[in-house]
Image (tube, rainbow, N blue to C red):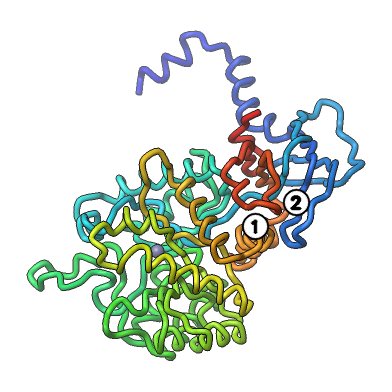
Amino acid sequence: MQKHVSFIGKGVPLALLITVLLLTAGFASAQTTAIRAGNLIDPAAGTALKGQIILVKDGKIVEVGPKVQIPDGAEVIDLTNAWVMPGLMDGHTHITLDFDMSSGFDTIYLRESSAMRALRGLKTAQDILQTGFTVVRDVGNDANYAAVDIRDAIRKGWFTGPTVLTTGKIIAPFGGQTHRISPEQGRFWLFEYIDADTVDEVRKAVRQNIYYGADAIKLVSDNSAFYYTVEEIRAASEEAHAAGLVVSVHVMGGEAARNVILGGADSIEHGFDLSDELLELMKEKGTWLLGTEFPQAHLEKLDPAGTMGQAKEEAAKYIDRLKRAYKIGVKMAFSTDSVSNLPGKNRGDMMLDYLDMWDAAGVPPAATLKAMTTDAAEFLRIGKTRGSIAKGMAADIIATPANPLENIQALRQVSFVMKAGRVVKTKR
Ligand SMILES: [Zn+2]
């Protein structure tokens, strides 16, 4: 303690100290930045305008147009040769995880503390931001609410990172996503899940997550032979909606999925076995699909023993389901469920690999980009502040050298990232 006192006394001039404080606190944020965008993409319309100027101040877009006056002293960023668009979003991630099925969920739950998970989550979030994702939703399996802490630490400005949204602990029927843990071990999965097996338990579990800071609610319905009823899903939906939160449910298909749709949940996560009839029902009820279509190479890494099925056949099944969902017109937000890294790839690169699946399913690039920006923002209920480049929106802006409306793979080459008005990546 005394050392700190003598440090200031020993000769850091007060004027210098004040200057440094002013520079770090207020001055930088008052700066206006002007971006010269050669091609500015509107993902909602699937179009691009040439020669636009975007003015950014205090983290927000204050003006956009072809003839915007650049104020004296503004910092000018030249993206005249680039394609400029809002930052990307992933609606289904697990930033605190890095595992495969051979080590299993259970091992990571037992061997890693919430602190370790939070540190990995922060690192992963920062990698993801570098690849162009400015918003990620963490849908549970984050130890003891570690993603809430990551979100808050980034929000406080302690660290650079994307906007993190979190669902808190996963609510599930008895046992969560574990299997046959011996009774002597007790319910150690409660470190990651909330057991909820009646309408009242579901209501209480939703309230617990809201209390601890969740932005949305996630349930796993059909990981066991038993699954949630319409009434249980409805209870979760009522509680969450009353608090302004969306409800997302892990479910594959069949009767369990029908219960999820009829119970008023906002999204089905995965839905690998959804029939056309259920996809039609989703469209009718306005249920979103966050389809997490794993590419074959990811399945091979995640599940080398093939316990989830043969990777090639599984990937083909996911492509077919994505194709059918797009054709039927189900609302979709881009989602990956990426939980591990392959050699030479960080988590953001892994997430961009899912573009291959959208391409293989025949989804046009403009529709894929919309699912990654405007549509994702609508689903996540942040569409009023993020997901497009317009006056008043947060300055989450990225750029690529090639046009993603022609070839969505252009997103693998994101050369510029601005997060809330701060440049976090430039490659010119
Ligand atoms: Zn998941």
Instruction: Verify CB contact (< 8 Å) between mark 1 and mark 2.
Output: yes
Query: Which residue appears at 48% of the width and 16% of the height?
Result: 8
Residue 208 image position (x, y, % from top left): 39, 70
Residue at x 69% of width, y 42% of height: 402
Quadrant of image for the N terminus: top left
Q: Secondary structure at mark 2?
A: strand
Would you identify the image quadrant in which residue 231 lies?
Answer: bottom left
Q: Which residue is mark 2?
A: 41
Q: Which mark is residue 380?
A: none
Q: Residues within 10 Å of mark 1 (few under 14, many from 20)?
A: many
Residue 110: x %, y % from top left:
19, 55
Q: Is residue 76 left or right of residue 171?
A: right
Residue wearing tag 1: 369
Query: Which quarter of the rendering shows the C terminus?
Result: top right
Q: Pick the residue in front: 390 or 13.
A: 390
336 w.r.t. 260: above or below: above
Residue at position x 71%, y 55% in the image: 388
- The amino acid type of the residue labelled 1 equals Leu
Residue 173 visible to the viewer:
yes
The reply, left or right, for residue 183 in relation to residue 265 is left
